[in-house]
Amino acid sequence: MIDLVTRSALELRDLVAAGEVSAVDVATAHLERIHATDERVGAFLRTLDDEALAHAADIDRRRAAGEDLGMLAGVPLAVKDLLCTRGVETTAGSRILADYRPPYDATAVIHAREADAVIIGKTNMDEFAMGSSCENSAFFPTRNPWDLGRVPGGSSGGSAAAVAAFQAPLALGTDTGGSIRQPASLCGLVGVKPTYGLVSRYGLIAFASSLDQIGPFARTVVDAAELLTVIARPDPRDSTSIPKPPPNLLAGLDDGADGLRVGVVAEFFGDGLEAGVRTRVTEAVERLAGLGADVVEVSLPHAPYGLPAYYLIAPSECSSNLARYDGVRYGLREEGATSAAMMAATRGAGFGTEVKRRLMIGTYALSAGYYDAYYAQAQRVRTLIARDFDAVFANCDVIVGPTAPTAAFPLGAKTDDPLAMYLNDIYSVPASLAGIPAMNLPVGLDDDGLPVGLQLMAPMLDEPVMLRVARALEAAVGFATTPRGPEALEAPAAA
Amino acid sequence: MTLSDDDVRHVARLARLDLSDEAVEQLRSQLADILAYAEQVGEVATADVPPMRHPFGLRNVMREDLAGESLPRDEAISAAPEAEDGRFRVPRIVEAEQ
């Protein structure tokens, strides 16, 4: 018996297409893995067993009838609970949406389902995507499959943990300032934040609209590229969706890194970078040189101002976006004598500590007398950061650095110190502010046996060159995405 | 940077957020710390720099203004905490006249 949960998405698709296993077998194996392990991991807020098995059975029926199948036919997919799923609870990890059932699907969910990916569940997350550890979920924390005493990162921590724990080969997450890349780094996965506008945000519950993007988690670069291909397309229902055909993400994947110029960001190797991360990332850069890439040091002089700017821009936008949770149209309602009292009571009871903190920062930054000094100044700094990237990309194909300053940290280590938690995103935020594509590639383990990730960044819509370099390095590094160690979740039997 | 309890309560009122006294106390120092950190953006000279409106200068892409399919009313209000006659029901908005 092949252990289906260890297979890549592409292997599963090919096995199903060839009739060697049924889509129902694939879905069943993954659901069993979830039910056997998720009490310890906590990746899923809910599984969709009946829906998944029904979709899988339909795929098997259509295959038997000789009908065309989608490009991810039979591949199980976990979906972050920030993406709307019609008729299925979508909570954003918040009490205020604990019972919310959206009347429509997110565009990315529709595309994934049309590609015959089998959605097996909705994953845990930091409330409204605000957090870097998955400890801000209103429901329960998610744990890192590599070490169950440590966090998986966040905010897409449930999606990352699900793929790392072999509960699903693919997952959708969202990234505003690092919420795909940082958990991918902490869980030893490939995670891609696409160019802003490449994937429709329709049906993505908004946090900071000028930054939010949906993207894939996978255990291989090719799998991530396949899922991104499925969801990347223009959408008339998102006015920030790029209105032209997406680049071909699969064509040149195996063309190697030879002859490409790779910039290493000097500012990403300063104080605060853990020694173990520095070592593995430096080795990965040396490997790129060994693959024929022309490696040069580059500078993003305004990058150190990225995180301060982000902590004005993102809270400002969230304070506006989250005004919609007013106890009127959906979600929780607490009693109040007037509408204003009802709204304040509802929001006071429904939002968690971190969300309240960000609403307060954003409301303050946008309030009378502060707009120019805070939000407008942050947006000017954002322009300078984007110009820094432009200048570097005039001479480089991709640029690299660490994804996160540390490997996975113990649960509770940073929950009492918001600024310490925010520093998780110090290297991921600049690409978010510039709107360019960026991704995490696992490049090794530190001395504690925890995954370390390399961040790759590319010019707008140049995902193909970014994925190509990642694919070349992935082959050279030979990272084995199998959690191990005394505190780790036991790995499934190999094939 | 310092904030008073009244500053915090004022911002909470603007944000329509009921906060306990404990939360006000905690937020007072945390917001001061976070804003002090964020104020580093003020160190950057930006006299001639325009604020970024969009990463690539893309304007909003609007469809033609034609009536199309939309959610049926019953579905649109199906998640409302209170609804009546196809409308959202809310508590009193305007204070009663004395």
Image: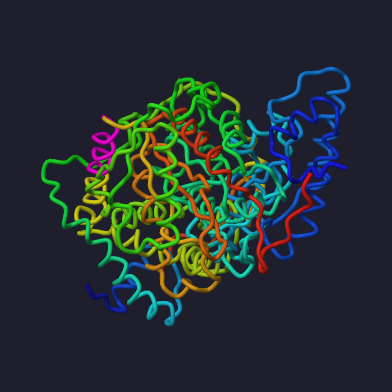
Q: Nearer the viewer, residue B28 or A399?
A: A399
Magenta-colored stretch includes residue B83: no
* Image vertical order of residue A489 relative to residue A376, above or below: below
- Say left or right for A240 vs A363: right
- Rendered residue at 62%/48% (across/down): A480
The image position of residue A406, as x and y in percent, is 45, 61
Outermost residue toward the front?
A290
Coloring basis for residues: rainbow
Residue name at image x 63 percent, y 65 percent: A139
User: x and y percent of residue B89 in the render?
Assistant: 59, 54
Considering every residue shown, the one lying at the far left of the view is B47
* Towards the viewer: A291 or A361: A291
Percent position of residue A95, x then y: 60, 63
Which residues make up the magenta segment?
A383-394
A162 left or right of A459? right
Residue A3 picture quarter: top right
Q: Nearer the viewer, residue A388 or A482?
A: A482
Instruction: Please state the horizontal and vertical placement of residue A122, each as a whole percent of the image.
Output: 67, 50
> Which quadrant of the view contains residue A125?
bottom right
Helix, strand or loop: magenta stretch: helix
Q: Is residue A389 magenta?
A: yes
Q: Residue at 16% of width from left, 57% of height from top?
A: B43
In front of the other: A329 or B47:
B47
